[in-house]
Image (spheres, rainbow, N blue to C red):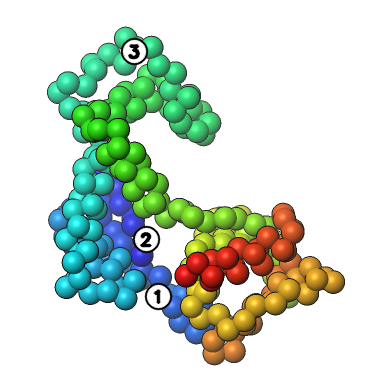
Amino acid sequence: VVPDVNVAAKKFGIKLLIPVADGMNEVYLRCENENQYARWMAACVLASKGKTMADSSYQPEVHKILSFLKMKNWTMSPQAVSDPESIDMKPECFVSLRYTKKYKPKQLAARILEAHQNVSQMTLVEAKLRFIQAWQSLPEFGLSYYIVRFKGSKKDDVLGVSYNRLIRIDIATGDPITTWRFSNMKQWNVNWEIRQVAIEFDQNVFIAFTCLSADCKIIHEYIGGYIFLS
């Protein structure tokens, strides 16, 4: 269950990755407003864990999603600082390099101050909790990336390793090509002579790859560790 949300543009979408024999199908849901999105998103999150909306965690999940959307709604509050230049702040300390190239310091300072107004009244513990929730809701949360060469392929791909799945990603565009879930995995092996990881999934699906950006032992241990934890 992946959020596809832009609060400012009133875009409330949900992307569902549904297991099929040779990987995953993608289904997109579009909601009309924040409340509808929160109810559907909470229901989908619970469903992905094998729970229903009758579960006691449904309403808290709805409230968590709504509070997160409120935090993402960068509306300038009345008490926000009207002149960003009057604040001694270096925007480049708060954002990545690509944003400092894309926007002027004054624009970045204004956005940072607007965002700060949404969390300035919170206690320290609540602010930390919101940060963790925001971090965990990112589509790329918990993914580790490695450059690999799949058996039979003439070009390199990126392999994303998550706690519950492997994702083959196009190295040029960054788009996911195929997803395989650990729950469908029958076995995995490593050929230590040629440093190749081979995995067998349900319905006679086989994949094999060599890891170019790290030792294949690392991916082997990632898979084993995640399956053990689950």
Q: Is residue 164 left or right of residue 159?
A: left
Q: Which mark is residue 87?
A: 3
Q: Nearer the viewer, residue 203 or 58?
A: 58
Q: Amino acid at mark 2?
A: Val
Where does residue 202 sit, x and y in percent of width and height?
54, 86
Q: Nearer the viewer, residue 145 or 12?
A: 145
Q: Which residue is mark 1?
A: 18
Where does residue 121 sit, x and y in percent of width and height?
21, 29
Q: Is residue 38 left or right of residue 23?
A: left
Label 1 or label 3, whichever comes before in sequence order: 1
Residue at the (46%, 31%) spot, across then down = 95
Q: Secondary structure at mark 2?
A: strand
Q: Is residue 82 something one can see in this rendering?
A: yes
Label 2 or label 1, whichever comes before in sequence order: 2
Q: Nearer the viewer, residue 52 or 78?
A: 52
Q: Amino acid at mark 3?
A: Ile
Q: Which mark is residue 2?
A: 2
User: Could you give the CA–CA distance between mark 2 and mark 1, rounded to whole angstroms?
Assistant: 11 Å
